[in-house]
Structure formats: C-alpha cells, structure tokens
Amino acid sequence: MIGLRIRRDIRDLDVDQLRRLRFAFARLQADQGRNGYQALAGHHGVPDWYCLHGTALLLPWHREYLLRMEAALRAIDDTIHLPFFDWADDRAARVGLPAAYTDASYALADGTLLPNPLASAAVAPLGRRSRRASSWNPTSLRSFAQSVDLAQLKKSFREFSQGLEGPNGSFHVWVGGDMGSSEYSAYDPVFWAHHATVDRQWAMWQQSARSASPSPVLLNQELPGFAGRRVLDVMDHAALGYDYAGLDGIRPDPVGEATRRSTRPGGDDQQAGTSNVRGSSVRTGRVVLSVDGVRRNAGSFSADVFIDLPAASPDTPILGNPHFAGAFGIMGMAHGQGAPVHRHTVVGLAPDELDFECLALEVDITEAVRRLGVLPEGAEVTLVPRTSSGVPIDVHDLPIGEMRIDEIVSP
C-alpha cells in the first residue's frame, strides 16, 4: 500500500482528521460551481439522472463517482481521503450511524462551533436540506452484513454485482429519507461513506479466489456521465491510487462449486406475506430466504423477516426476538418527475447482461431457523414491510415475486 491513499473507516479517524474532513465538506457544500457539492450530488439523480442502480454498471460507475468526490475534497485539503463506514461490522449493529454523521455541530481547533456538514446538506432541487428517517433498529445491519457474505460467495461479476445490489439498497432504505430515493440520495453526506463501503466490499471480492472479470463487452462499456471513462479503466482500485484500511491479507477461503438445494413454496400462495415456504431438510450449510422477481419500478420499501410468527406486525420488536430472522430493503426507481434512469444507449451489450430487470434478493435466516429448532419444510415466513419513511404498507402490495428457502453448502 506504499504510495496509495488509504481510505479509512470514519469511526477510526482522529479528532484532527475528522475536523479536516468536515471543514472540507462544508467548503464544498458552499461551492455553487460546476465542481461544487450540488453539481456532484445532482449527477446521480435529480437533475442529471446518471445513477446506475439495478445494472451491471452499479459498481464501476460508483467507483468513478467516488473518485470525483474525493478529488473535489482533496482540492480543498490534500490530506483528506474519502472515508467509508463499515455498516457490516459488529460496531454498526450495536450503534447504527456514527456520531460523525449525527452530531449537530463540530468544533474548530479554536473551539468555534459550526454546523456539522456531514449531518445534512442542501438539496437545491427541493429547496431544503437533506433528511433521514430511519425506522429500523441497528440490529438489521447485521442481516445486511450476512447478505454481503452471501454475495462474496458468487463466482461471476454479474452474480456478485446483483448480490451486492440487495444489501446496498437495504442500507439506503435503512437510513431512510432522501437516502431511500434514487433521486436525492447523493445529496445526503452519508451516501459517500456508504458507497465507499460498497466499493470496499467489491475490492474485497476482487482479491478473493472467487472473483472473475466482467465480459470483454462490459469491460469496454463507457460509464454514462463520465466521458471517455470505461469499466476497464476502474477495475483496479490500486491503479487509481487508493486502497482501503483493513484489506491487507484478506483473501476469502477458496471454494469449489457451492451446492444449492431449493424448493418452491408449497400450495398456491406464491406471493409475499405469510406463507409456508417449503425447502430441503437442513442439517448443515446456510439457510437462505430467496426473494425473486423484485421489481424496482415502484417506491422504496423495507421488510423485516420473521419465522413462525404469523401475527408479526410493525409493532413486533426485533431486538431479542427469536423469531426475527433478518431484513432487506429495496431502493425503488419510481420517479415523480418521470425521468428515466436508464436512458443511455448501450451498444453491443445484451439487455440481460446489463440491466437487472428484476432483482433476486437473499436473506440469511440460518440463525433463526436453528434457534427455533425448525426445518425449512413447513417453516412459516412473514414479511413486515414499511416505506422508506417508516410507514407500514400492505404486504400484498410489495413488488416482488415468489419466495423460497435454499440450503447452500460449500465444500
């Protein structure tokens, strides 16, 4: 890592490093020019509409996007490196968002108090500051982390990218408010630390024995909104001049082909809600709830997953509840302005190679299944959904297809 910029977890920055970061964010937010905060944030959703969630360009596009933000911050203070927030670790599951993003103010070296620019930023298209509306317990972050672990088992770039799409969207909706919408999420300062975390998760997979390069056609695909930049140009983060703290020596155990045994839900109930999801008898391996056919053309939502608790409701506690099995969220692509997200012409790339028309989500429910002493056959799965602002919604209105339980056994 000699000569590379090292991106660190924001919780590990010292007082001076965090002060410098906040000061640079404040300066950037005050810049109304073409390289200022509003221009950078607007490149993702409103008004430029270049975001590429739900496609195989999700990871490379956001890697380039982070580079642009980091360069803007370093033009103010070249000691700064864009931090990440590892929401997949145990600290996050206990505490939630770091104080760096929730403190109302911060102190300069002389003691002067200033508003914390990491707590919110102006959203010029809305004429207000960014808002958060998290309604989830930090415990849910552990479930997202397990979904990241499942993604790390994938052996093709497309499968890995789609696998990471789930926990990425889950965190967006967990934060809630503007972070829960593709239109305005990049205006929230926590967006940048979150996507640095996702980029770090990709870097971790890239150095594993499982990783594989995208297809040659995808490698040559231009990154929309970044003229002259292709997927190939951002594949090697070290060649881009940076690395992540904590990745030294990390190389996930090499594996052969994992065995997956699945059974479709029994009966006629193929929709979300309370249903008997039948699967193979599980003795070893991981037990995974797979949710197929997730459509992104609706609003954002979150869902808590309960096993053998058909009466679960939005008032059902999560912490300490043996029936709570996990959670997931979807950052929808319903745009009131009617602006198309994927408006870019893709030359030479088959639609199913680029665009995930429907997502498939995986939630690791191993601990709940074994804690309750049940086998997947006959296990009753109940989803308790909410909007990104925490308002309960009817489970039958969820834009998802069928559910099934899989057993994944790795050699």
Image (cartoon, grey):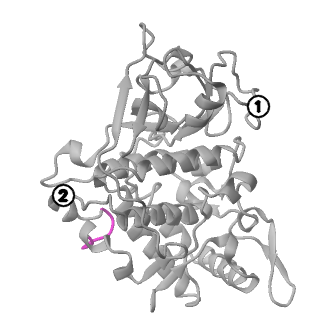
**First along the sequence among labels 2 and 1:** 2
Left or right: where does residue 209 sit relative to residue 21?
left
Left or right: where does residue 271 sit relative to residue 382?
left
Q: Residues within 10 Å of mark 1 (few under 14, many from 20)?
A: few
Quick one: 264 or 330, which is closer to the camera?
264
Q: Residues within 10 Å of mark 2 (few under 14, many from 20)?
A: few
Instruction: Give percent across and percent down for residue 371.
Output: 65, 31
Mark 1 belongs to which amino acid?
Answer: Pro
Q: From this viewpoint, is residue 296 visible?
A: no
Residue 340 picture quarter: top left
Q: Residue at x 69, y 52 (%)?
A: 93
Q: Residue at x 76, y 65 (%)?
A: 99
Instruction: Give percent across and percent down for residue 232.
Output: 24, 70
For residue 16, above or below residue 382: below
Spatial CA distance of label 2 from label 1 is 45 Å
How many circles with numbers are drawn on the protein?
Answer: 2
The quarter in which the N terminus is drawn is bottom left
- For disc 2, the marked residue is 215
Q: From this viewpoint, is residue 127 visible?
A: yes
Mark 2 belongs to which amino acid?
Answer: Ser
Q: Residue at x 85, y 90 (%)?
A: 110
Q: Which residues are magenta?
A: 224-229
For residue 400, above or below residue 366: above
For residue 252, above or below residue 112: above
Which secondary structure lies at badge 1? loop
